[in-house]
Amino acid sequence: MLLCGLFRWSPYLKGQEQRQKVEREERQRQEQAQQQRHAEEAAISKALAQHGLLAFNEPLQGREELELELYISSANKFAPEKLIAASQHYRTYGIMTALAGKATCPKEALEILYEHAASQEKTGLYSEIAMEQLYSSIIGNPNASLDLVLRMLHGDSPAARAAAVRNGKLPLKDKMAYLDKGCASSDDLELSMIARDEDTPVEVLECLAAKPGARYGLAGNPHTPLSVLEKMSQSTDLAIANQGRQALARRQRNAK
């Protein structure tokens, strides 16, 4: 009987032993990963303490990008020449964004960041929305010059133009000259920005009603005429028609 009982329990004991082995191995892996992470963090902290903004070379490895972003975004005050040097040194998206976000970043550094951003956009590594956000960060800095904003507005990049048209430094006459030609664009992001802008002339909004890329902007613009929304709602393009009908329904609810 005893032998029979042990025989029956043998698979259970073997299974329990296997689970314990797996758990030990998992704990060892976690401990090794934690030790490696601590060693990496210590090495990064040492590099930043010794070399500051220029502590790393691209391509950035492991946690270098995150830790450098945090270092840049911290309360540390960096001399203008160091920010210029860092702008020349890095082309990583997150690092450029962090540098552009420093209120003390000089206009010379911002112009370098713009050139690097334009170069990165051509690689296709980042989405158009991500590039528009980077361009917006660069010219959103209080030290960005009007000349830089105008360069973006008149450049070849729809993402840069979309960022420039929303920038507060842009004179109204330049903005309106751009918006007046808005229907000529074939880029969805740019069309959406133009359609959403409350300064866009009615005749441009009417023209945009037939463009699928403008549908969300038109539907969200409180200045879009009801006639444009009605035209959209009757479109043979289902995406345009749906947005038109939804916008009309919101207008009717708000009017009550």
Image: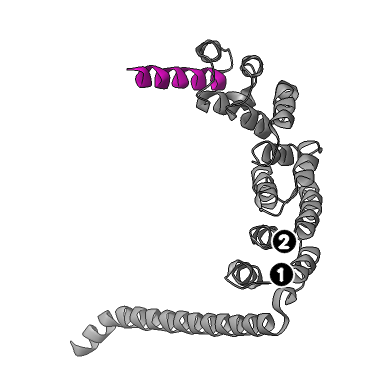
Q: Which of pointers 2 and 1 lies earlier in the amino acid sequence?
A: 1
Q: Which quarter of the rendered picture does the N terminus lie within? A: bottom left
Q: Which quarter of the rendered picture does the C terminus lie within? A: top left
Foreground residue among 106 and 16: 106
Q: Give the residue drawn at x 73%, y 28%.
A: 178
Residue 106: name its quadrant: bottom right
Mark 2 belongs to which amino acid? Thr
Circle 1 Cα neighbour tier, 10 Å, few/some/many (<14 / 14–19 / ≥20): few
Residue mark closest to the camera, 2 vs 1:
2
Numbered range of the magenta stretch: 238-256
Q: Give the residue drawn at x 26%, y 81%.
A: 9
Secondary element type, mark 2: loop
Viewed as shown, does residue 47 lie left or right of 112?
left
Mark 1 belongs to which amino acid? Leu
Q: Is residue 219 above or below residue 32?
A: above
Residue 239, percent across and down?
55, 22
Residue 195: name its quadrant: top right
| Residue contact at pointers 2 and 1, CB within 8 angstroms | yes
Taking the image as drawn, is residue 62 in sight?
no
Residue 34, percent across and down?
52, 81
- The disc at residue 60 is 1
Residue 31, percent across and down?
49, 84
Where is mark 2, residue-wise?
92
